[in-house]
Amino acid sequence: MDAKIVATKPFDGQRPGTSGLRKKVKVFQQPNYLENFVQAIFDSRKDLRGGILVVGGDGRYYNRRAIQVILRMAAANGVSKALVGQGGILSTPAASCIIRKYNTQGGIILSASHNPGGPDEDFGIKFNAANGGPAPEAMTEAIYTRTSEIDSYRTLETEDLDLDHTGEITLGDMTVQVVDPVADYADLMASLFDFGAIRKLFESGQSRMRFDAMHAVTGPYATEILENRIGAPAGTVMNGKPLEDFGGGHPDPNLAHAKELVAMTKGPDGLDFAAASDGDGDRNMILGKNFFVTPSDSLAVLAANAHQAPGYKDGIVGVARSMPTSQAADRVAEALGIECFETPTGWKFFGNLLDAGRITLCGEESFGTGSDHVREKDGLWAVLFWINLLAARKQSVGDIVKEHWKRFGRNYYTRHDYEAVDSEAANGLMDHLRRLLPNLPGTELGGVKVEYADDFAYTDPIDASRSEGQGVRIGLEGGSRIVFRLSGTGTQGATLRVYLEFFEADSAKHDQETQAAMQPLILIARELAQIETRTGRSEPDVIT
Ligand code: VG1
Ligand code: CO
């Protein structure tokens, strides 16, 4: 079958952000918009010709359509084999697992993650490299450059394929193998965690739990692993059927968007353990009875207890966290005598450290935790790690975290998001902060001395690549920090994120309500950035 060459013109703005190209579905539906980006991937990743490509997505609206387009283009661009999740479904960590397990040349993942789905909502596409991780910046820049000069794309004229049954299909000269999206991933989890010990915990009846898939991709994964393989009671997984619009909600596992689940942990009859994941299955939220574990604390607790899970029984070699993530993990690394890295926001920056064997665990404040088992953050992995920990330590979630604070001190932490702010105002605010930076060190904020103030830049310790302008960082004496950055995943205006952290060593002061305890720092941040006068917003839209 001959490839058809279709003439096209470049679209502006196809530069991938923190995690791929994310736009409104309507933008992706423009003729040639998706095709241009996909052809730019094939043009800049020459090893895909004759290679194996993984394709799958989180099942949101436009997923099925996009996959048919991508498969035709893959065949026309000389890919020899495509591995596709049944029904077009692959969670982001499962895609990473399959890219690695079958030694493929990479994968195309369709997702806008925690953003809402549906005809008027968001869609996204990203390329993951042969290591299973999100394309590093040099790769995404090459793809972007190609989108700005593209004049044609290659495709085939064929009928849509039936992707709802596993098995092999021929498409031109390419083989499409439709794979069970869950099996390989579930096997990997079974190799890392003690399913027997977890089963006993469930059988004891002492730990009542729920996992909220938020009508997103992790439903089938959680049902297979928790209910079928481990034997948790039926109904442990809630909202387990993936829907194209996630039931109209934000598939974002946090206190603001997983309200139903959070409510189930409250009161004397509250659940002992509850967890949720996001649209594409890479995020996690961990809750205990009347207890919320911040993602930053979760990373630190997992690092301190890693040896309790079979997959990490020999300990960990190092940890990394994104810059805005709290410094709780740094304290654990110091106690363990292992390396700790601070990287820019986005999972792509962990890839080199993981590949080089410099770190075992990594995480972000945005409900992302993961390890060297794949090259993406992994929601269900974090949930299983926590349940394994509960089974091994025979303690409640709250007790484990409180004991951790007693030993290492507590890093109080919160993030305030101002969403869909006018872009010009948001950029003006960041410029204003950058202008303040040189004069801040040595002055006082709220009576505390500023130790450093900078616009975070990162030099990758493995390949020396440099990333600048990654967020304004203000460090105060005693370990408090204020960080400001603009989101790189939003699709409407700008989203300002304000990250706040302060350290409390005294265990008598570890029981404060977070927002109340952080009020002084919150006010300082608002004033310094002139948030209200510049954006017209007096309160954040989302507090996590
Ligand atoms: C956000 C988070 C970041 C995360 C990214 C992708 O990016 O802050 O930590 O890596 O989303 O997560 P930003 O640029 O909007 O702050 V996911 O689960 O949306 O793939
Ligand atoms: Co996600």
Image (spheres, grey):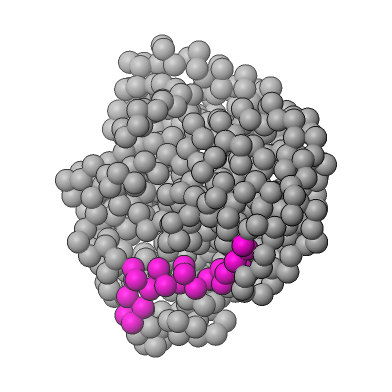
| Residue 326 seen in the figure | no
Relative depth, front residue between 507 and 409: 409
Q: Within the magenta stretch, is there residue 186?
A: yes
Q: Is residue 284 left or right of residue 316?
A: right
Q: Where in the figure is residue 435, as x and y percent of width and height?
A: 50, 13
| Residue at the image point whose x is 69% and y is 26% from the top | 149
Residue at image x 41%, y 25%? 466
Determine the residue positioned at 32% across, 22% down.
Answer: 451
Q: Is residue 507 left or right of residue 369?
A: left
Magenta segment boundaries in residue numbering:
175-197
Which part of the image, by quadrant, shows the N terminus?
Answer: bottom right
Q: Is residue 6 above or below residue 472?
A: below
Note whether 71 is above or below 289 in the view shown.
above
Q: Nearer the viewer, residue 522 or 216?
A: 216
| Depicted 249 relative to depicted 32: above or below | below
Q: Give the percent coordinates (x, y) of residue 398.
A: 36, 64
- Assess whether residue 122 is covered by the magenta stretch: no
Residue 383 versus residue 492 in the image, above or below: below
Q: In the depicted view, which residue is nearer to us: 427 or 223?
A: 223
Residue 500 position within the rendered picture, expressed as x and y whole percent measured from the top left = 45, 37
In the image, residue 128 lies at what x, y percent?
Answer: 52, 47
Residue 529, quarter of picture: top right
Residue at x 35% of width, y 32% of height: 463
